[in-house]
Image (cartoon, rainbow, N blue to C red):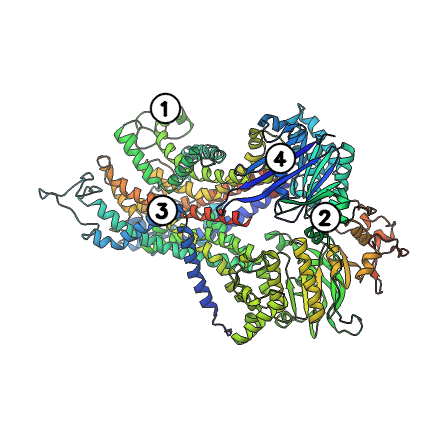
Amino acid sequence: MTLLRFSMRRVGRMVATIVILVPLTFMLFRAVPGDPSAAVVGPDLDPSIAALLRERYGVDQPIGVQFIRYVANLARGDLGISFHYKQSVGDILLNKLFNTAVLAVPAIVLALVLGSALGAVAAATSRRGVTDAVLRNGAFVGRATPIFWTATLALLLFSYRLNWVPSIGMTTPGKGVVNAGLGMFASPDFWWHLALPLLVMTLYFMPEPLLTMRTSMADVLREDFIALGRAQGLSPARIIYRHAARNALLPVVTLMPALTGTIIGGQVIVETIFSWPGMGRAIVDAVNNFDYPMMQGVFLLTAVMAVVVNGVIDVLYAYLDPRVRLA
Amino acid sequence: MTGPYPLTKHRIWQGKIIAGGRQVGRDLWSTPSGRAAIAIIGVFILTALLAPVIAPHGPLARVRAADGGLARLLPPGPAHPFGTTNFGRDIFDQVAWGTRRTLSVAGVAALATALIGLNVGLIAGYLGGKVDSVLMRIADTAYAVPFLPLAIVLVGILGRSDVVLVLAIAVLFWRTTARVVRAQVLSLKERSFVKAAVVSGASRRRVLYVHIAPNVASLAILYGMLLVAEAVLAEAGLSFLGMAPTNAVSWGTIMFDAFTSQEMHRAWWWPLFPGLAIMLFVFAVSLLGRAHESLQRRHLEVQS
Amino acid sequence: MTPILDVRGLRVVFPSRTGPVRPIRDLSFSIAPGEVLGLIGESGSGKTTAAKAILRLLPPVAQVSGQVTFEGADLATVPDRMLRRLRWERLALVPQAAMNSLDPVQPVDQQIAEVVRAHRGMSRKEAVALAREALDRMGIRADRSGGYPHQYSGGMRQRALIAMATVLQPALLIADEPTTGLDVVVQDRIMALLADAKRELGLSMLLVTHDLGVAGEICDRVIVLKDGEDIESGPVGTVFRAPRHPYTRGLLNDEPVHRGPRARDGEQTPTAVCLDRVHVRYTTGRGLAALRRPRHIAAVDDVSMLVREGEILGLAGESGCGKSSVVSALVGLADIAAGTVQVGDIKLGGDRKPDWRALRSRVQLVFQDPYQSLNPRLTVHREVAEPLLAQLRLTGDEVHRRVIAALEAAELKPAERYASRRPHELSGGERQRVAIARALVLQPRVLLADEPVSMLDRTTGGEIVSLLRRLADDLGVAVILVSHDLSVLRQICDRIAVMYLGRVIETGPAHEILSYPRHPYTRALIDAVPTSDPTVRRARVLLPGEPPSALDRPDGCAFHDRCLVARQTRCHQDVPPLSIERHAVACWYPLDKPAAGESMSDK
């Protein structure tokens, strides 16, 4: 009941953030120097055709009307027509979103699970032990390493030099695999393509949960109730499992919102390097193609996704921590 | 309000920042990781300053081999410690000049970001109430916006320029500093020495400048330094995606050139060295953060 | 009779950067079955370290030597598995009242059941039932036993910890400051529960405390610790009534401070501060929820009082009764919602915007925590000069002269030497004196002191309290002293006002209030104070129910649901007014003044 009320409040805040975000996005794209239609074919356009284009994209209307129309279209899930592909941005992005998720979701899950586990190990062995030193310094180096560097070097080594895995794309063209949809998962070819980007992304996301878990676990182990647990004759395993783990995981959960930016940024770069046909590459391509509706669509969709993910994480946090839920 | 003591607010504030900076520096130098970090960062800053001396021909000069042809894709050797590119450019020279550019863009971005964050944090924390709610809601929104897509879109709209790079960084990254400063101000506000100042008749500005800001200054300086590392990574990421101004040479653009050259598979050294520079610099800054943490822990131990 | 616990030559050494720290140097004692031994001393005396060393709970860096024999086993050398069995089955701990001693993400009964299951092969259901039974013994009923720690009050958490410690019926209980930080009424209940547990379960107990009253009431024998050494020990009666060591005598001293020569005939001296029907409200709810429907909580509800120059008024009551809010309102840290405050010719409240500047040179405040009340970056001189710099235009010489004068008034001598120091170079007592000097430098007419000694050791606190008395006598400052500790108020106050849920329920001359309380609540408050004289058996009046919250104030007399004399309808429906007498009381059925000699406090 209280969790439900908390969730409702959180949804309210999410909506508020999105309400700020939508006009901001709209204004951002109104800031394009000159006429957006000029971008489609270039500045030396026949004035009458330019006027036709302006009418088609609705930019001849007053700004207020444009905004209302924009919001109305958004409400119907219509993100406009891509300048470059001459197709509905929404349709294109739906496909790309799937491709992105196929890579990002396993990477995030792996990074969180492995990262927290290794962080807990580091904390448990943290009396200046070798394991802790290796894990901690490894994480610090990992956090300092730009993902485009690891990705490039991994590509050079595993793909170009050793020739273990393919270098680009999600599938090998002409191998008869559908380039989208669930059928893909049955193809070993797809998994071969997935291996390297997945490895790079997992390694890239892992340091933060690892370091957070290490610190929070070490903090929790210093708490009075852990000392009391020892005084109660509980075994170390029982103390860690029953009391320490759940408390220590809380900061890892709060880390997630700050991590979404990193994840999205990493995704953009990895997709570019491995030619992965997802949202990240779409936005870089859109900039290179001056495809404003596409840029706008990807940007808004990413931002909204980030807001929703953060909201879900807050609710998850409230579920895990009674102090928030029953405050 | 000038009393008998020459303590105008401005001078107190300025003095405290300098004193705070010196204090932070001295403290950090006292730890081994702090010393290592300061040494590494010092080498980078020297390289940036001395780039015209180290690499007098500039980053775009083409090197000729002994036979008079362009020295294309030479592996690292005595003449070219980091090797050369497919256009016969010396990668060591490029990295040296890249240091100059990367650090100046990142430094300006970090300074702008830290100033925004510090002021937002001070104002939100000290005034509280509706001002605080509004500012923090804006910070929430800034948290929700992922950096790279926004920066790419800004470049797409405003074109490729240094100003856009700085703007993209500053417009989002202030959020962390603002939150940290605000939290610190909130906790200071509840301390009784601040209440005592209010009770003894100090004006709001006097409370903020004499009692709160100096106690926040060292924290803000530390976050400013950490921001430089974030800005370096951000600038490099954007440059790698080809969002930097043409002909600019930074660590990220060298890697962009390598990646787009189609010849990278024959020149492993090309992307290696600029990436190594980024890693080393960011790692050194994170060592500063660690040194700060261990100092705080030492501080706590002394207190308890 | 073989002792249950025997400690021989216990030493603890912590290596540190500045050389080894020795919190315990050569401590020996033993506890017989069924005996309660008190380990008493001020903070830093090593008493908690001793308890932890016995339980082998010190961090691995600590070097512990000496022999600790518990039920025939040497605790220092028993293997871990054996030690784990001994812990809690035979040897349990009640830690200091702290939020952090319970796991914040698990319901309390589950946590206790967890301990039971770790030691006894039981189903979860049986273990929970046993846990609930233990909680019930401590007065936490089934409807609250499944709650989370943050939903408990401090007293409930402490009771839950005792339930946890006694659930397996151990042979020895080590209680480490079990009542510190709790209000006196709550403390009294905890002590009663500990005494009951000891009697019913036949426990031996090692009680670690700084409070001699607590020790005097439950201990059979005591050891006085100072700097890790046993300076005096013996049966509690002997030690407390005829202390041999001057340190122990200092601890036991709480005689009223001698009054100055000043005439104290109240009617002639002018009024320093006057509160007339003051209300203070707080708004709850955060963020957007607060904008929508703010909830007002009356922290101070219709309070009137008057303090004359040179007079000390004590404000007493449990935490949350509004005594600190009165102080906040007087210095403008809280808004006055209704009513007026008059200080000299300045009037606050009502419609006019108050002239805070002028007020703040007349009313000054000394805070509770001396470790937080000084700006860590300022020297003592600059700290004390701050109010002058902020308010007045004075020459540097004049500032210096007044700072030195204020430091000397606060008895920091030689003042010149203290002036250049920074807070971290000062002890707690010295810091509090600096805070007093800072308050005095503007030469105020009214000095407010909000729990000024609650963070200090008893001896230091006594000195600060006497200083306040001298300031009132010599400078004619009016002092309002807020304290939950009646013995502090007894020492220096001329008059006392007792507050309950935002209202004054009894006020009058200090000795009359303390000797012949007329409100049942005041009576309970006074009776709950433990006495360090073990021959005095006080009648314990345990208040039922939980401490009140201003969030849901009972109708009628706010105290009726805990009152032992409250009667139907009248007490439940009508708010009793404060009577207009020198010794005034707000109660429909006030207690009679007892015949002389009958009073508990008149020993």
Q: Nearer the viewer, mark 4 or mark 3?
A: 4
Q: CA distance from mark 2 to mark 4?
A: 24 Å
* Chain assignment, label 1: A
Q: Residue A327's x, y, as percent?
A: 63, 45
Q: Are marks 4 and 3 on the same chain?
A: no
Q: Residue C390's x, y, as percent?
A: 55, 70
In the image, residue A48 above or below residue A326: below
B96 and C418: which one is in front?
Answer: C418
Q: CA distance from mark 2 to mark 3?
A: 53 Å
What's the mark number on residue C55?
4
Q: Are marks 2 and 3 on the same chain?
A: no
Left or right of residue C457, residue B40 in this image = left
Q: From this viewpoint, which residue is outermost toward the right?
A: C595
Q: Are marks 1 and 2 on the same chain?
A: no
Instruction: Name the amino acid type tagged 4.
Output: Leu
* Labelled pair 4, 1 in contact (Cβ < 8 Å): no
**Residue under pointer 3:** B36
**Residue under pointer 1:** A188
Left or right of residue C587, residue C343 in this image = left
Q: Secondary structure at mark 3?
A: helix
